[in-house]
């Protein structure tokens, strides 16, 4: 029973919480606006009843004159220059139109003076400097002209000090903002430097682990015919093919290491492989013993990113065919039009048994080569299908948009 009662109480608490309207928290600016409205209302409530004690104003006009004295304060945040202009215009007109009472010798109400000074301070802090100069000079002349006796000079000096104080606050805020921006730039630069150092470390590790071993492969392949006597011509040709392939891989690795060591601007200038190097890729595969045939159709002008993607797809597909279907014939087809470009790499069934075919299935299911190719094609808006063919063998077919930035739907590529 106790557990049931607690469950019922918890459900009631959730229902009450859902039915209770959420209280929206006000930010600092909204709190300032609320306070500004409250202060303006208080000043208006003071100016209206006391206006008859300072000036001879008809009863029907008193709310207007009191509003002219207090309400411009509402513009202190939205548009202080406009608020100052309204308050200063009222201060200029009121002493001329309405006479003061016998017991009051100042030309304006105290509320009007307070609002005018607050608006002048806001103008000096936020408005353009020419507007600040106009407001300062006009307000000083206004007090010099209407203040009783010699009080105008004192008011002019006080208003000048007020403007200077506002300008000091303005410059202090600006300097702090600039300092914050500089600190942000410095933080971004430190993060960028840390990334570059990490990339340089990765480049060093790759160089130590991969480049050195690839260099040894090149040296061993080139020196093998001289170190091993009586090699048949087929073996010498095989060593030459291994050396050429290793040198090409080493050159690409060095290019990648240069990109990792750079600050991000080198890739724009470094030459990247494109469709003009497809023949070199095919020739290298033929030297490795793969029977590759090439069929080219009409080709549109592609972007560098599209050509690099097609080159990498062809490179990975030929490598997969050599690994998983040794001895199989490979056919590479490349053609396109103004809408899309298609690259197809098809290998026949392996001649060494069904184990290679199963290896091809495994690479499709769980390997990273197909996934990497699919990600490359998807990054430029294309599609890729890879899988076994009904009659045996394997096909990789990529279709990319010929126009940079376009995207092809998934259905444009049929089953492999």
Image (cartoon, rainbow, N blue to C red):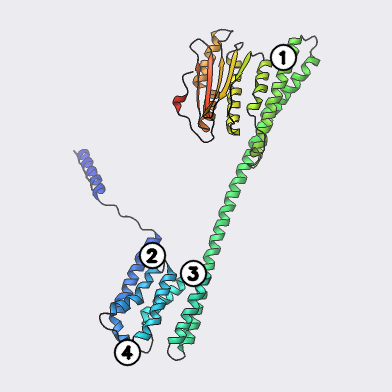
Pointer 4 with pointer 2, Cβ within 8 A: no
Q: Position of residue 147 (x, y in %)?
A: 43, 87
- Of discs 1 and 2, which sits in the foreground? 1
State the residue in front, 328 or 292: 292
* Of the image marks 1 and 3, the number of the one nearer the N terminus: 3
How many C-alpha atoms fall within 10 Å of the one at disc 1: few (<14), some, or many (≥20)?
A: some
Q: In this rendering, is residue 67 above or below 272?
A: below
Residue behind mark 3: 125
* Of the image marks 1 and 2, the number of the one nearer the N terminus: 2
Residue behind mark 4: 101
Residue 131: assigned label? none
How many C-alpha atoms fall within 10 Å of the one at disc 4: few (<14), some, or many (≥20)?
A: some
Q: CA distance from mark 2 to mark 3?
A: 16 Å
How many C-alpha atoms fall within 10 Å of the one at disc 2: few (<14), some, or many (≥20)?
A: few
SS assignment at label 2: helix
| Left or right: 144 as drawn, with respect to 236 | left
Q: Position of residue 50 (x, y in %)?
A: 30, 82
- Name the residue at 52% across, 36% down: 405
* Of the image marks 2 and 3, the number of the one nearer the N terminus: 2
State the residue in front, 199 or 58: 58
SS assignment at label 1: helix
| Left or right: 251 as drawn, with respect to 107 | right
Q: CA distance from mark 4 to mark 1?
A: 116 Å
- Name the residue at 48% across, 75% down: 135
- Name the residue at 59% across, 33% down: 303
Pointer 3 with pointer 4, Cβ within 8 A: no
Q: In this rendering, is residue 289 above or below 375?
A: above
Q: Position of residue 364 (x, y in %)?
A: 51, 19
Q: CA distance from mark 4 to mark 2?
A: 36 Å
Residue behind mark 1: 238
Residue behind mark 2: 32
């Amino acid at each position: 029973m106790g557990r049931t009662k607690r469950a019922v109480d918890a459900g009631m608490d959730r229902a009450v919480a859902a039915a209770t309207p959420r209280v929206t928290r006000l930010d600092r600016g909204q709190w300032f606006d609320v306070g500004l409205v409250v202060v303006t209302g208080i000043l208006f409530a003071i100016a209206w009843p006391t206006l008859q004690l300072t000036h001879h104003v008809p009863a029907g006009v008193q709310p207007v004159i009191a509003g002219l004295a207090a309400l411009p304060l509402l513009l202190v945040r939205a548009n202080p220059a406009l608020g100052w202009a309204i308050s200063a215009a009222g201060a200029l007109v009121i002493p001329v139109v309405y006479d003061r009472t016998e017991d009051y010798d100042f030309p304006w109400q105290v509320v009007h003076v307070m609002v005018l000074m607050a608006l002048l301070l806001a103008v000096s802090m936020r408005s353009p400097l020419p507007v600040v100069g106009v407001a300062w000079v006009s307000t000083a002349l206004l007090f010099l002209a209407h203040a009783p006796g010699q009080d105008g000079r004192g008011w002019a000096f006080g208003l000048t000090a007020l403007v200077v104080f506002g300008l000091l606050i303005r410059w202090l805020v600006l300097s702090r903002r600039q300092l914050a921006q500089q600190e942000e730039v410095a933080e971004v630069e430190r993060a960028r430097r840390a990334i570059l150092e990490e990339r340089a470390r990765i480049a060093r590790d790759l160089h130590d682990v991969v480049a050195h071993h690839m260099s040894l492969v090149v040296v061993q392949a080139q020196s093998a015919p001289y170190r091993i006597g009586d090699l048949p011509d087929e073996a010498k040709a095989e060593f030459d093919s291994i050396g050429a392939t290793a040198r090409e891989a080493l050159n690409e690795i060095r290019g990648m290491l240069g990109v990792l060591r750079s600050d991000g601007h080198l890739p724009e200038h470094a030459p990247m492989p494109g469709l003009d190097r497809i023949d070199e890729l095919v020739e290298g595969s033929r030297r490795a013993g793969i029977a590759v045939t090439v069929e080219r159709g009409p080709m549109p002008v592609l972007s560098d990113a599209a050509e690099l993607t097609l080159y990498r797809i062809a490179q990975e597909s030929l490598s997969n065919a050599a690994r998983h279907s040794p001895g199989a014939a490979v056919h590479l087809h490349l053609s396109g039009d103004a809408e899309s470009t298609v690259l197809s790499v098809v290998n026949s069934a392996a001649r060494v048994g069904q184990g290679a075919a199963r290896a091809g299935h495994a690479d499709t299911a769980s390997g990273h080569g197909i996934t990497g190719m699919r990600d490359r094609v998807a990054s430029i808006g294309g599609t890729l299908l890879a899988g076994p063919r009904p009659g045996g063998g394997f096909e990789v077919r990529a279709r990319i948009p010929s126009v940079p930035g376009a995207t092809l739907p998934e259905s444009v590529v049929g089953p492999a």
